[in-house]
Image (cartoon, grey):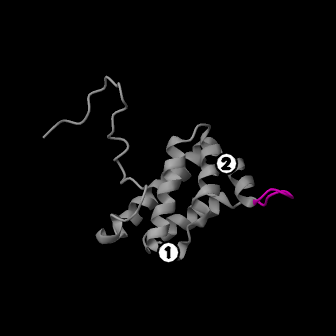
Amino acid sequence: MSLIHAYEKLGQGIDILATSPGPIKERLMKAFLDALAEVREDALPPEARPRWRQVWRRVTAVQGKPNEGRLVASIGALRDDEATLVAEQIVTIHAIVQLAVPMKDAGRVADVAPLGAVASRQPPGSSRPGPAAD
């Protein structure tokens, strides 16, 4: 797995966490099953690896029952506040990885918005003022 692939998968995971319906543990589970489980520690920059190890330990800590994997059992056992902390760590790891992605490659990464890009967009028909014009 390359740095770019890890960046893409982390971005997909964040998108799932932010936009999927349901409680945080369901969104976290979906993010791991659909994207984050593919992220490999050795593809991350050194400064992101301790955080990723911590996240991975949290989401694989519980031995699953027969026909239930570690991710399902471990995320299911988290309290909502713990699941939120894991999600926050994923956002932080993505930011660290984003800084390590060479600028020439950042433009070729499809469907991954830079952090903050989604938050600054105004929904259609919203009466909330948008960002100030320069």
x, y (%) of residue 76?
A: 71, 48
Q: Name the mark on residue 133.
A: none
x, y (%) of residue 113?
A: 38, 53
Q: Is residue 78 magenta?
A: no
Q: Amino acid at mark 1?
A: Ala
Residue at left offset 53%, top offset 75% = 1
Q: Name the mark on residue 43.
A: 1
Count of all numbered marks drawn on residues in the image = 2
Mark toward the viewer: 1 or 2:
1
Residue at left offset 32%, top offset 40% = 120
Q: Residue furthest right?
A: 66
**Which residue in the protein does label 2 denote?**
78
Nearer-the-camera pick, 30 or 80: 30
To which quarter of the image does residue 22 belong?
A: top right
With 132 as the anchor, is 110 left or right in this view? right
Residue at left offset 38%, top offset 44% = 118
Q: Amino acid at mark 2?
A: Leu
- Dot 2: element: loop
Residue at left offset 35%, top offset 70% = 105
Which segment is the magenta one? 63-69
Mark 1 and mark 2 lie on one chain; the one further toward the N terminus is 1
